[in-house]
């Protein structure tokens, strides 16, 4: 499920429909093969998403899924959506978790960006076949542990702490 390119034969990101359709660029996203996710949709949204994603997998494409659906504040409690476990079960494919520290450089709900190096780390693959709840726990623990480490390393490099970041974001 990992990937870093948005065009050509690369992965198909599954993203929030609100984000995909912002700014009148829906044609670019469609050309890139992105699969929109309607978080406020009807119960069959997950079924439609699953069908589109399975089609992409049949085309030997990768799927990128953001299990929380959106960015969260650094240090905030995880809010993974259970739909990611349902997708994992229906794909019957390995899942490669990814950790990143991008929230330091571009905090949630902030326009200003901060001078941090964004690090994206591909983590060991989770093999197919786990029960959905076991997969969900492993995915969250793996990503959160690695993300916390990346954030701590980036903060230490600048002589900062998580408390420094949290207090500056509240002001």
Image (cartoon, grey):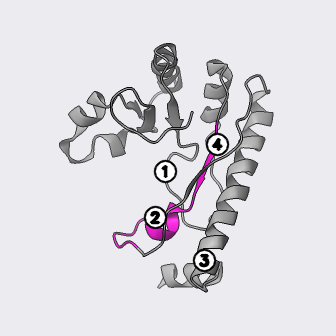
| Lower position in the chain sequence, tag 2 or tag 4 | 4
Label 3 with label 2: CB-CB less than 8 Å: no
State the separation of the CA atoms marked 3 and 1: 22 Å
Q: Which numbered disc covers residue 155?
A: 3
Q: Which numbered disc covers residue 108?
A: 2
Label 3 with label 1: CB-CB less than 8 Å: no
In the image, residue 161 sits, relative to residue 51, either above or below, namely below
- Span of residues in magenta: 96-113
Residue at (48, 23) in percent of width and height: 61
State the separation of the CA atoms marked 1 and 4: 16 Å
Q: Residue furthest left?
A: 24
State whether the magenta stretch is mostly helix, strand or loop: loop
Q: Which residue is mark 1?
A: 70
Asked whether 152 or 82 is in front, the reply is 152
Q: Which residue is mark 4?
A: 97
State the separation of the CA atoms marked 2 and 4: 21 Å
| Lower position in the chain sequence, tag 3 or tag 2 | 2
């Amino acid at each position: 499920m990992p990937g870093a390119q948005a065009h050509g034969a690369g992965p198909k990101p599954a993203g929030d429909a609100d984000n995909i359709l912002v700014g009148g660029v829906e044609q670019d996203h469609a050309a890139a093969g992105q699969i929109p996710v309607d978080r406020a949709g009807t119960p069959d949204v997950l079924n439609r998403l699953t069908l589109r994603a399975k089609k992409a997998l049949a085309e030997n494409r990768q799927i990128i899924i953001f299990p929380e659906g959106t960015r969260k504040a650094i240090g905030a409690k995880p809010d993974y959506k259970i739909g990611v476990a349902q997708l994992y079960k229906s794909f019957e494919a390995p899942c490669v978790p990814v950790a990143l520290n991008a929230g330091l450089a571009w905090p949630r709900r902030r326009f200003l960006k901060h001078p941090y190096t964004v690090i994206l780390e591909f983590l060991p693959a989770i093999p197919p076949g786990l029960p959905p709840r076991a997969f969900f726990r492993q995915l969250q623990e793996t990503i959160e542990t690695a993300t916390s480490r990346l954030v701590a390393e980036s903060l230490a490099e600048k002589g900062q702490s998580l408390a420094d970041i949290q207090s500056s974001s509240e002001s």
